[in-house]
Amino acid sequence: MQKDFHYAAIYVLSRLAGMKSEYAEKVAYSSQQVDDAVYDHALKFEDGDIFHQTQTAHKELGFIKSSDVNESFNVWIPFHFLPAAESDDVRLMTKPESTTVNLLKEDILKSGNKNNILYRLGIFLHLYADTYSHQDFKGFYDRYNLVELLDGVEHLSIKDKLKKLATEIIPGVLPIGHALSIKNPDIPYASWKYSRNSQIVEVNNLEERFLPAAKNIFIFLRKFLLQNDVFGLVVEDENLEFRLSELKETLKFRGTLEERYKNWLNKIQNNYFEFKDFDSIDENLNYNDREWFKEAVKVKKCPKFSIEGLKQRAYNYNKFYKKNNFDNAYWTLYMKAAAEHKYKVIHEILPQAGLNVG
């Protein structure tokens, strides 16, 4: 899924479940930040401290490359392609409502009193949503991801076709995730078709993936608020039927990612979803992927070929300064929540489900 769902739809679902706007925005921002935290270099601050960033995404989904399991363990598996860890044929495959998803749900519900819980919740909701859109693919460079895209909203370019050809003739060159399906799994209104080992799979994203994801995320958010009412009072409705038509209409909107995102924002800002406590946060909602970072850190760029620049070469020729309240800044708490989430997935959740990976 993309920013229209990971940020805007998650915000709407949080508000509809009963969450206050200030908390819903943190959850939604954390959810989308998973796709935007693409840096892994450490920040060496001028006060002597060093802060390690937790990378939760790559700038683009790698199309093909030689197998690199480290990449899978660091980014793809914990944040985008959670293995189901069930029967042998789907142990490493992503699947919605799997054993591992349910274990993560339980962990989130048990962690409600932690100061980073909203950030962890947002990160989890990103991964949860992706188990729907990324289902039937693996977060490894794996032969299972070798599919033939037969139809869709997006099609392989000539360059992409040449890369796909490489997977067929060069041993060890494999795609990761849904790379050979381009962005079709992430477009809410898309109907698309692919084949794997002569078996044809037809997908209606809206009815089969996005609406079920929205419904189950809403149900989970209600459970979360029932145990953590400091963040809002849960609505009485136990399902999403009271706003399903509005959500469906918004998800059906056809356009580019930016057009779809702006359509969501316009509806939120004009209270199309009828939030009972509609306020200024709803009215001015928007996402800036570097907002939290800039609130926490000041960056000074050094000329590459200067003495000062050479000293900072290991840090991308930057000097970093902590801003006031750095330790409790949203970006800092998000980074710590991402590190905790990654550790839990790799070292606790997957082993608990019977998949020992580290």
Image (spheres, helix red, strand yellow):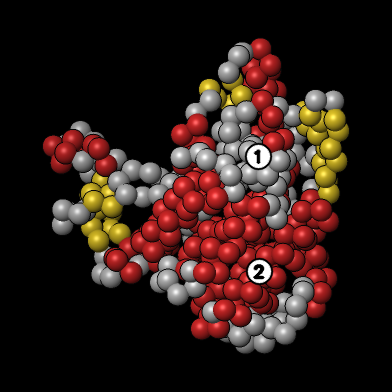
Q: Nearer the viewer, residue 330 or 271?
A: 330
Q: Nearer the viewer, residue 135 or 185?
A: 135
Q: CA distance from mark 1 to mark 2?
A: 24 Å
Q: Nearer the viewer, mark 1 or mark 2?
A: 1
Residue 188 seen by the camera: yes
Residue occupying image coordinates x 59% and y 48%: 353
Residue 35 against residue 121 in the figure, above or below: above
Tell me the crowding category of disc 1: few under 14, some 14 to 19, or many 20 or more residues within 10 angstroms, Cα based. Answer: some
Residue occupying image coordinates x 58% and y 33%: 140
Q: Nearer the viewer, residue 58 or 267?
A: 58
Residue 91 - label: 1
Residue 246 seen by the camera: no
Q: Answer with the quarter of the image where residue 15 lies.
A: bottom right
Asked whether, in this view, residue 25 is left or right of residue 114, the answer is right
Residue 206 against residue 272 in the figure, above or below: above
- Label located before the other in sequence (1 or 2): 1
